[in-house]
């Protein structure tokens, strides 16, 4: 078995982040293969915005899908898939679903190979259900009051729980806080604002 070169490391990402020289678009050296793993790995690492406290390598910008993407040989490739392809040696298009397993909660923008694993579509759906989300993540998930779209505050959620415990109906409580009954139901079941 041929030893595969180390393409990514936290130290390499840190060094790139610490480099303050202006970053120009990264071209493969003349005559070199622009799809060479080393070149692609460098492109990935140059696109990382920060390393989070939980070790996530946060890609600089998200697309509408919530994932990072790069153009490789004229094709748009999701960065986390590219990373796992480079690390595993499998072509990106042959990979099944690439799932996140970030210690601080899944971050779709994370491209730390240690936080990625290949699963089947079924695995990914089961994983999503287990983690309380069914739809694919859109951007870093914001919970509760941190979510700008949230109408509720921690205080309001505490009141809602108290009202429900006191026997108020979900629809009455929903009207009072101008949210849908399904939101109240999710709070009641602890599927929303579980940390509040
Ligand atoms: Zn991560």
Image: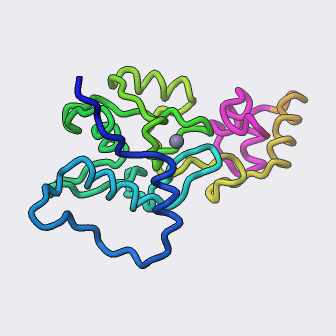
User: Is residue 167 placed above or below 29 in the rendered structure?
Assistant: above
Task: Please provide percent x and percent y for residue 87.
Answer: 33, 37
* For residue 44, above or below residue 173: below
Where is residue 167? Give x, y as percent. Answer: 86, 27
Name the spot of residue 54 as percent of width and height, x first. 62, 43
Quarter of the image where the N terminus is located: top left
Looking at the rendered image, the quarter that the C terminus falls into is top right
Q: Is residue 122 magenta?
A: no
Task: Please tell me which residue is depicted at 46% across the width and 62% down the height of the picture.
Answer: 16
Residue drawn at x 36%, y 28% as measured from the top left: 118
Q: Which image quarter: residue 131?
A: top right
Does residue 38 sit above or below 190 in this rendering? below
Relative horizontal placement of residue 70, taking residue 12 as reference (left or right): left
Left or right: residue 18 versus residue 190 is left
Give the residue displayed 62% in from the left and 36% down from the top.
182
Q: Residue furthest left?
A: 31
Chain part drawn in magenta: 169-195
Here the colouring is rainbow
- Image: 129 above or below 37: above
Which of the pair 157/179 is nearer the observer? 157
What residue sits 70% from the left and 26% below the top? Answer: 189
Q: Which corner quadrant of the image does residue 89 belong to?
A: top left
* Residue 99 vs residue 150, the one in the foreground: 99
Image coords of residue 6 (percent x, y) = 36, 41
Query: Is 93 placed left or right of 123 in the picture?
Result: left
* Total labels drawn: 0
Q: Is residue 179 magenta?
A: yes
């Amino acid at each position: 078995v041929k030893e595969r070169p180390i393409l990514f490391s936290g130290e390499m990402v840190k060094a790139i982040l610490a480099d303050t020289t202006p970053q120009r678009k990264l071209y493969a050296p003349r005559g070199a293969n622009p799809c060479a793993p080393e070149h692609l790995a460098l492109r990935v690492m140059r696109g990382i915005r920060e390393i989070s406290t939980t070790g996530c390598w946060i890609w600089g910008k998200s697309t509408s899908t919530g994932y990072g993407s790069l153009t490789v040989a004229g094709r748009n490739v999701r960065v986390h898939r590219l990373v796992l392809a480079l690390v595993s040696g499998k072509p990106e298009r042959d990979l099944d679903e690439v799932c996140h397993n970030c210690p601080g909660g899944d971050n779709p923008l994370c491209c730390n190979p240690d936080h990625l694993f290949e699963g089947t579509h079924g695995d990914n759906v089961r994983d999503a259900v287990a983690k309380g989300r069914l739809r694919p993540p859109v951007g870093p998930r914001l919970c509760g009051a941190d979510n700008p779209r949230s109408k509720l505050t921690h205080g309001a959620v505490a009141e809602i729980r108290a009202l429900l415990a006191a026997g108020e109906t979900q629809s009455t409580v929903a009207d009072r806080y101008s949210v849908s009954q399904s939101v109240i139901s999710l709070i009641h079941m602890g599927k929303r604002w579980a940390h509040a």
